[in-house]
Image (tube, grey):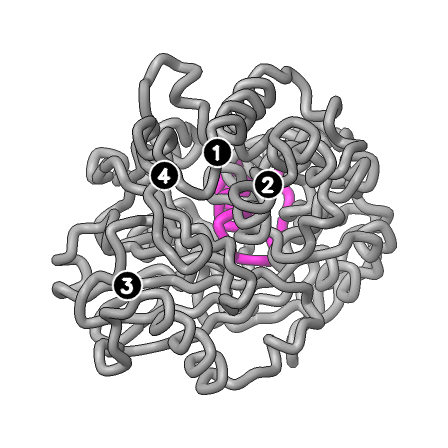
Amino acid sequence: MQQEWAVVGGGLLGMTLALRLRQAGNDVSLFEAAPELGGLASAWKIGDIEWDRHYHVTLLSDSYTRDLLREIGLEDQMVWKQTRTGFYSDGRHHSMSSSLDFLLFPPLGLAGKARLALTILHASRIPDYRELENTLVEDWLVKWSGRSTFEKIWKPLLRAKLGDGYQRTSAAFIWATIARLYAARRSGMKREMFGYLPGGYGRTLAALERRLGEAGVRIRVGMPARQIEAADAGLRVSFDGAVERFDRVVCTMPSPVAAKAAGLGAHRKLDYQGIVCASALLKRPLSPFYVTNITDAWVPFTGVIDMSALVDPAEFHGHGLVYLPKYVPPDDPLFEQSDSEIEASFLGAIERMYPEFRRSDVQAFRVSRVRHVFPVPVLGYSKLVPPVKTEVPGLYCVNSSHIVNGTLNVNQTLELAAGAARQLLAGRNSRQEVAA
């Protein structure tokens, strides 16, 4: 029977769910609070280019991302490259891009390198993340790799994604990270390839939005949902100055926002992580490394991502595009700092790290702030995951909290969407049905 569905939250997860619900024959309306669709994957203008607001990369083994790109006619336009990885440790840059780099890596001794390799091999052979879910990631990594290797290698990698939240994170997180990065190796490839779509994720979102429109999905942007509540035989969604009724509602907003709008108690218990991510458009590329992991604690951001090391310079009109992320809790004072304060602090650190850099190289600088990105995967996290079917009849909630044994990225989001769509259309209520 055809039903009227509302999908609240127009990021990639909400867009994909709206498409699947519509393809199943339902009437679907998609609502997004921002002026445009895309959420964390959205694009913006920096200087004279338009590119992703946050850094993203596609791996050759990211099958869900590639399937969606194929569906919307873009997969054959992907560009694939091998990139280099660096570490900034004790005031010096080091490459960690090959087996030789690994053997020559100065911050680790021979024993440390052997234990690091053993840790990765051991993690790659663990079949079930639940074996690690009740052990702190720091304790597990120190046990297998040693304290020195943890401080020089693992800690900066954890802080780059979790900030200081790594201290409460289970070892299942590092298992998921290794599983994604080594998926290609398990399938027979010697090295993972990194890919991007010319034009960035803005092209993906535009093509997906066109597909939604062609399918008959009603799209409304600039419509923040203030309240979702039961009404008669369905649900009532209240926006600023408007109220609409639906048979079913799927909320893809972050748990703290969803809990406030719909009174979802289970979602109040989750401890979310946010991000402050600066983008700098430079006269020229900054680094030969796509990612530079940082071990020195004085640096105010947790990594340097130079998209120019991956993307054809022509995409940036010959400029360099650098992301400087800092993952922090939603109440961190960094959210209250002005753009100019963050620019002064972050660029001051870049000057110390890269002596050839000059402030005059900066063509544009912008700061993105998102208070709720994903929950910290604490000990026993899978038991904290709220059911997709909420206590409000007809209301479902699907968001990054349901990524149980993975890390938040585009491919994991699309895998979550695939599982959630199956569950919504089948009317089931199993946590693990959508847990990715």
The residues tagged by marks 4 and 3 sit, at their Cα atoms, a distance apart of 21 Å
The residues tagged by marks 3 and 1 sit, at their Cα atoms, a distance apart of 34 Å
Quadrant in which the C terminus is drawn: top right
Magenta stretch?
Answer: 1-27
| Residue at the spot of label 3 | 321
Q: State the residue at coordinates (40%, 50%).
A: 56
C-beta proximity under 8 Å, tags 2 and 3: no
Query: Which label sits in the foreground, 2 or 4?
Result: 2
| Residue at the spot of label 2 | 148
Q: State the residue at coordinates (71%, 72%).
A: 331
Q: Position of residue 98 (x, y in %)?
A: 31, 31
Is the residue marked by circle 2 packed among few (<14), some (14-19), or many (20+) residues within 10 Å?
some
Q: Position of residue 239 (x, y in %)?
A: 66, 72
Q: Position of residue 251 (x, y in %)?
A: 67, 53
Q: Position of residue 420 (x, y in %)?
A: 62, 35
Whether residue 356 is in magenta: the answer is: no
Residue 181 sits above or below residue 305 on the image: above
| Earlier-in-chain disc, 1 versus 4 | 4
Q: Nearer the viewer, residue 254 or 205?
A: 254
| Residue at the spot of label 1 | 109
| Residue at the spot of label 4 | 96
Identified by mark 3, the residue type is Leu
For residue 249, say whether it is visible: no
The residues tagged by marks 1 and 2 sit, at their Cα atoms, a distance apart of 9 Å
